[in-house]
Image: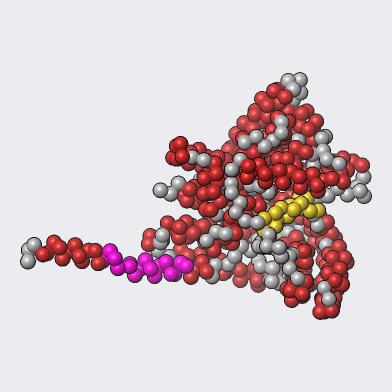
Amino acid sequence: MKKLFPLLLLLMVACQEATPDKKAVSTTQEFNNFIENFNPSLGWGGLPTNSDFSAESFSKAHATVGNQLKTLNKIDTSTLSFDAQIDWKFAQSILVGRDLEQGEMQFWKKDPRRYMNFRSIANLIGRAGAAEDKLEELENRLKLVPKQLTNGQKQLEVYVPRFQELGLFMAEGGRQLFKQEIPDFIKNAGSDAKKLTEHAKKAELALETFIIFLKTDLPNLPTGDFAIGKPTYEAMLKGKFLLAHDAESLWNFGWEEFRQTQSELTALAKTIDPNKTWQELIIDIKNDYPHRDSMISAHQYWVDKSRDHILENDLLPIPWKEKVTVVPRAQYLRKTSYYGNFSRSKGKDDAGIFQSKWMINPFEYQWDEATKQQYLVEHDWGVIIVTAPHEAYGGHHVHGLYQMHNPSKLRRENGISLFSEGWGLYNEQLMQETGFFPNERIHLRQLQLRLWRNARVIYDVGLHTKRLTYEEAIQLMVKEVGFLRWAAQLEIDSATSRPGYFIGYFLGMKEILAMRDTYKAKMGDAFSLKDFHVKLMEAGNMPTSLMREVLLKD
């Protein structure tokens, strides 16, 4: 019997190990249920597109986020798998970010653009698919426009002059949607589309009323500020971005890196022309641009070239049928940034292709001569060649495809600028390292564009903690980066309404390069850029600290 006892003990232990831990199974199911019901990422207004943007809807959304945080924080993460623990941390960071936006920042009380959700209607009309399949959704969105704009008039509490100016530009530009784009859609969509006419007219009338409000009533409200303040900014850095930085260390980091990039520009300029400063060379480079009527085709050419480079150098596989098309940007969006924006594929089109669109501000013949020239020198060959990889290959377009196919629902539906924009800027650096740029003049332009993203760190933390004024931020871009004032102003405007977003470019790139060094040291001779890139793409689009955890997992 004594001899049998150890054997029986071993059998009992083995049976216990083979029996699933009931608590672990229960906790995993609890977390899976939480993720299944987790709200997807919300629109720019902080609410989904089917909201009326009432004060009650904002309050309800904030309460929902608070309840979700409480539920998430009660889950015992110790029994979750590694991937589930990463998802838990990611979900918490998302909710903390939303809680700050809805509870502390509350841009819906000061930025009229938050109520202009009619902008999404243009995307709906242009989306792949049959017109008749869009009618119900388009009808619902049109019905919401008067409610959303009316609520804006009720709920805006402060007057931020620049927000008012930008809101008015967007609202007046939106007239084209109701006067041309929607009527054209109704005309070509068959008899069933005629029911949309009345809803479109009501929406158009609501827009005209909102324009009057922006011109006459909004300026009479108490003058407010776009800055979110140091405590909220630091809570965002820690809770949403999962960074060790506080406002002071981020400010110092931004300036140290800025001076380092300027030194690199100075050194490179001497190898190109020792008789000119880098600022003088940049002026020369920016005065070499495509013909004004060839802007779209010039961008498309370098998008296609960047795809060839990624594949021919085996930098990152693209295992899907896909395409990036360059198109003119909608008129009413052209004052939201000086250049344009990128729209990632949301799924396969009718031909079974994942197609993304790079929408750029086109040249406009009605401009005066000074404006025309200013446009051309900000759309030079250098910026096109450097930016094509950032937006398309292997930047946002390719990253978007990988994210779309991530097995984690949470990681498919959510992302953060700290990695996604950092990845875009990293691709500009990668193309320089792998010989994509045709000459050192383009390399110089790449460094200057990196300096711009570097400056974003400085003025984002500076503006929102009131360390910089609006005008000082513009002067930083004009005098030290080399932007024209109009382009610098549109650039700064974006940061005022999206605190924290723009730090993602430079800070994210630096984090990715550091990850690459660490991963290379770990892998030794087995390291390859392709392997590194694939592992990052498959990890998702999370705060860089979480991306590092996944990448370096044993």
For this rendering, which residue is in front, 73 or 79? 79
Residue range in magenta is 16-32
The colour scheme applied to this rendered structure is: secondary structure
Q: Position of residue 123 (x, y in %)?
A: 75, 63
493 is higher (above) or lower (below) than 284: below
Could you tell me which residue is drawn at 52 percent across and 61 percent down? 407
* Residue lying at the far left of the rendered structure: 1
- Residue 81 visible in the displayed image: yes
Q: Quadrant of residue 274?
A: top right
Task: Establish if 184 lies above or below 328.
Answer: below
Q: Quadrant of the N terminus?
A: bottom left
Q: Position of residue 191 (x, y in %)?
A: 84, 79
352 magenta-colored: no
Q: Residue at x 82, y 35 (%)?
A: 288
- Which residue occupies the extreme top position in the image? 275
In this rendering, would 294 be left or right of 464? right
Secondary structure mainly formed by the magenta segment: helix
The residue depicted at 38 percent of the width and 68 percent of the height is 25
Total numbered labels: 0
- Write the residue at 26% across / 66% down: 16
Question: In terms of depth relative to the viewer, which is nearer, 222 or 8?
Answer: 8
Q: Is residue 207 left or right of residue 507?
A: right
Image quarter of residue 196: bottom right
Whole-percent x, y for residue 517 in the image: 50, 38
Where is residue 84? Give x, y as percent.
45, 60
Left or right, 470 with respect to 514, comes to: right
Q: Is residue 205 visible?
A: no
